[in-house]
Image (spheres, rainbow, N blue to C red):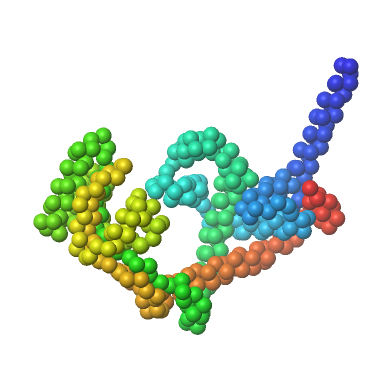
Amino acid sequence: MKKIITTFFASMIACAAVFAQSDMTPLAVVKHNKSETITLKQLKTRVAFVQKQYGMESFSAEQKQTLLENMINEKLLCQAAAKNGVAISDTQVDNAFLSTFSQQVGRQVTESEVEELVKKQSGKTLDEYVREISGMSLVDYKAYLKSQLVIQNYVSQVKQNEIRAVAATDEEIRNTFEMNKSSFKWDEMMKLFLVMVPKGSNDMAAKSLCEDMRNQYIKDSKKAAVFINAPENSKSYQAGELLIAKTSQQAQALRWSDEKLRELFSRKEAYVSETTETTTDFQFYVVLKKYDAKLLSLSDVVQPETTVTVYDYIKNNLSQQKQMQYFTKAAQDLAKELNTDANVDHKKKGDALTKLLNW
């Protein structure tokens, strides 16, 4: 019995070693500026990443080979960037990684804060969370992110004049407008001056402050600017002007009921509300200006009291799209120039490669 068990475990160890060796099989060596090997394991990680990003269940051997070529091109461009002195610091990578979390939280956050937040909300470590959403470990994801930033900087630097020259034409702008006329409109909107005083630990003090600010405003409307610019703003209270639309989404954002929002839009300009109480604060508002709903023309501004016209808005968006398309093609062309036998050693080709990619 002991011999059988020993033989079984020996076989298991041998199988594990074979799989490990298979995963570490080199598929290609990129050597434009230095020697970097792309292994089967790295390709599997990339496939998992793309599956997570696009919700794909499986890949054909041909699709995996395309991903392998993409990885080769990425390394070629990164090596060319290094050769030309283009570099990205770890701090820049960390900032890029944290940017999405910072936008969600509404302020700049550190990685330790994100780690704590993820642990609290999901019970997972940050590494486990990143693996779940990307198919990569935190280290691998940051390495991937770094390579993308390096490539972006390198291609932008090499092709900056050409990219800047790409712009939407007048005909493209007008055609886009004609095909999307109904989406360029104003909902019924209103500009408010809003004051909110958090309750904190003293409801009565918060209510008293809110009422005092309201009384000061009624006596002198110029006090609005004083309240907005005072150091106490954002510490003891929040005061500012905002543009709101007559929609349920807007009501939810303000923590108001639809009924309260409809009531608001029935008010005339210069109306000053009473001090009202919510679950978290006391507040009052002033109706500064009202805007009727309307369809927009090319010469209209996209939003009241701004300077960007519909024409400018479409031009900027179309130009960015065209520049991104040009950037993608420029990156592909640069990689194609570098993808030579002198710079890339394909360790597996043809049937041998296809066989390896059938997993």
Q: Position of residue 143 (x, y in %)?
A: 58, 47
Which residue occupies the foreground of this view, 341 or 238? 238
Which residue occupies the foreground of this view, 288 or 134? 288
Residue at 47% over, 47% down: 101
Left or right, 32 with reference to 103 = right
Seen in the picture, residue 159 relative to 74 is either above or below; the reply is below
Q: Position of residue 313 (x, y in %)?
A: 42, 72
Which residue occupies the foreground of this view, 48 or 263? 263
Which residue occupies the foreground of this view, 56 or 183? 183
Farthest residue, direction bottom: 171
Residue 31 is at least partly visible in this image = no
The image shows a total of numbered marks equal to: 0
Residue at 37% over, 79% down: 299
Farthest residue, direction left: 219
Residue 78 is at least partly visible in this image = yes
Q: Where, quadrant-wise, is the N terminus in this rendering?
A: top right
Seen in the picture, residue 185 relative to 223 is either above or below; the reply is below
Residue at 23% over, 38% down: 203
Q: Position of residue 254 (x, y in %)?
A: 34, 52
Farthest residue, direction top: 2
Left or right, 77 with reference to 97 = right
Left or right, 169 with reference to 308 = right
Seen in the picture, residue 36 relative to 302 is either above or below; the reply is above
Residue at 17% over, 54% down: 226
